[in-house]
Amino acid sequence: MKKLSALILAAATLAPSISFAHQAGDFLFRAGTATVRPNTGSDTILGGHFDANNNTQLGLTLVIW
């Protein structure tokens, strides 16, 4: 029974919320990962070469209503 309760609590905590109400004057700050995974190469660009590799970095968003 304790395992089931812990599982339900963990699922409820980690589940995304359906909606949030925002009002004027609210600040919204989000952080997460931003990933680039190109699947094709590039031709020569103005006599040079452009190479894009997989990369993951921190993505930040600040919204002021």
Image: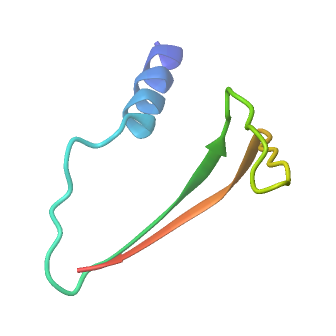
The residue that appears at 75% across and 51% down in the rendered structure is 45
Q: 21 left or right of 63?
A: left
Instruction: Please tell me how many numbered marks the rendered image carries.
Output: 0
Residue 51 in the image: x percent, y percent?
82, 44
34, 2: nearer the viewer: 34
51, 4: nearer the viewer: 51
The residue that appears at 48% across and 31% down in the rendered structure is 10
58, 41: nearer the viewer: 41
Q: How is the image coloured?
A: rainbow
Which residue, as the protein is rendered here, is positioned at the far right? 48
Which residue, as the protein is rendered here, is positioned at the far bottom? 25
The residue that appears at 40% across and 23% down in the rendered structure is 8
Q: 35 left or right of 52?
A: left
Which residue, as the protein is rendered here, is positioned at the far front? 47
The residue that appears at 21% across and 87% down in the rendered structure is 25
Q: 9 left or right of 34?
A: left
Q: Eyeballing the image, is 31 above or below 37?
A: below
Quadrant (top left, top right, bottom left, bottom right) of the C terminus: bottom left
Q: Quadrant of residue 15?
A: top left
Q: 10 left or right of 50?
A: left
Residue 44 in the image: x percent, y percent?
79, 44
Q: Eyeballing the image, is 49 above or below 28?
A: above
Residue 16 in the image: x percent, y percent?
35, 39
